[in-house]
Image (tube, rainbow, N blue to C red):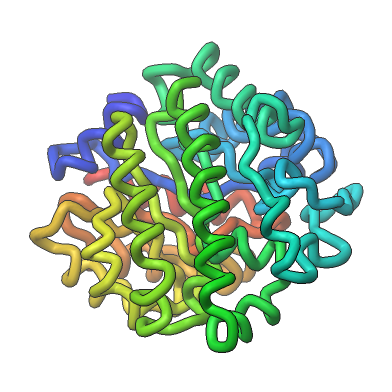
Amino acid sequence: MNSFERVMNRFEGKDVDKIPNLNIIMAFGAYHIGATYKEFVTDYRKLVEANIYCCEKFGIDAVSCISDPMREASGFGATLVLPEDDVPYCKEPYIKDYAQLKDLKSVDPFKSERMLDRIRAVELYKQKVNGKYPIIGWVEGVIAEATDLRDINEIMVDLLTEPEYVEEIFEIIYEQQYKFMEAQVKAGANIIGVGNAAASLIGPDLYKKYVFKYEKRIIDDIRRLGAKSKLHICGDISQLLDLIIEVNPDMVDIDWMVDFEVAVNKFRGTHICACGNLDPVKVFLQGNKELVTREVKNCIEIADAKTFIAGGCEIPKFTPIENMILMNDLLYKK
């Protein structure tokens, strides 16, 4: 059974020889192929090389296009800082005043250098590993992208003081999100990750009122185009789990601070698979053999037939390779 078969079987609750390992690889992958992070986020060939290397070396069961949250922001026109070995960021907010919204338009992702780079990654994965590993494309969720364009503190205030403008920017972001997602699916992505980290900061009431409809819309769009969806909201989403069930993605990443057993039990009987939720720092980066073994076995005991195992978020750059190998070995069914 190869990784593609393993992951697709797991989505359906069918038999697998190993619980799929869906650790998120970014800085760790770049480091292990000797690339700077700037190279990883600007040259799709490096991103693809790093992912395939980590799949082959550490048993990860999918290749991914995740790298940084600034692909769409760049397409909108934001000026980015690209550190040599760190994550891209906006030096100052692109949307300083909502009067600028009249000029904010979604763009053709093929005409945006950074969005096109991700599409090229999907295409290269399809050439190299199609049918061997599932290919995960990636887009930013509406509130995550809004914080990239406007600043996270401003968006949090705006949700309370100027929500009509927040909804206007969400609509524009959704248009971009759809175009980018569609291009990746057509290029060969089997799964689309939707990264919406800021959603964990606003609580269920604001999520339901302002974010939910866009989350559900893009998840439904992904399914309609024939791909699987993976909702990734960093942080404590305990209070959002019931709403996420209504959003109905195929998979939800569960970060380490969420009670994994509660999440798995809530999703049981639904369409949704839980994925998680090992602490990337405490377990992977700092953990010894005993801690890694105990924590992985705990997740396995909680898992049902549709659960995936992974770190709750990105694997840290300097994680010992012994911990990565041990985690993967433990996932094989004895």
Whether residue 78 is situated above or below residue 191 in the rendered picture: below
**Quarter of the view holding residue 229:** top left
Whether residue 298 is situated above or below residue 115 in the rendered picture: below
Q: Which residue does the image show at 58% across and 28% down from the upper left? A: 52
Q: Is residue 319 visible?
A: yes
Q: Which residue does the image show at 56% across and 52% down from the upper left? A: 172
The quarter of the rendered structure image containing the N terminus is top left
Q: In the rendering, at what x and y percent does residue 201 appear?
A: 52, 80
Q: In the rendering, at what x and y percent does residue 291 appear?
A: 47, 71
The quarter of the rendered structure image containing the C terminus is top left
Q: Which residue does the image show at 70% across and 69% down from the upper left? A: 98
Q: In the rendering, at what x and y percent does residue 156 appear?
A: 60, 82
In this view, the residue in front, 195 or 64, is 195
Whether residue 248 is situated above or below residue 254 in the rendered picture: above
Whether residue 221 is situated above or below residue 314 in the rendered picture: above
In this rendering, position of residue 188 left or right of residue 9:
right
Q: Which residue does the image show at 36% across and 84% down from the upper left? A: 205
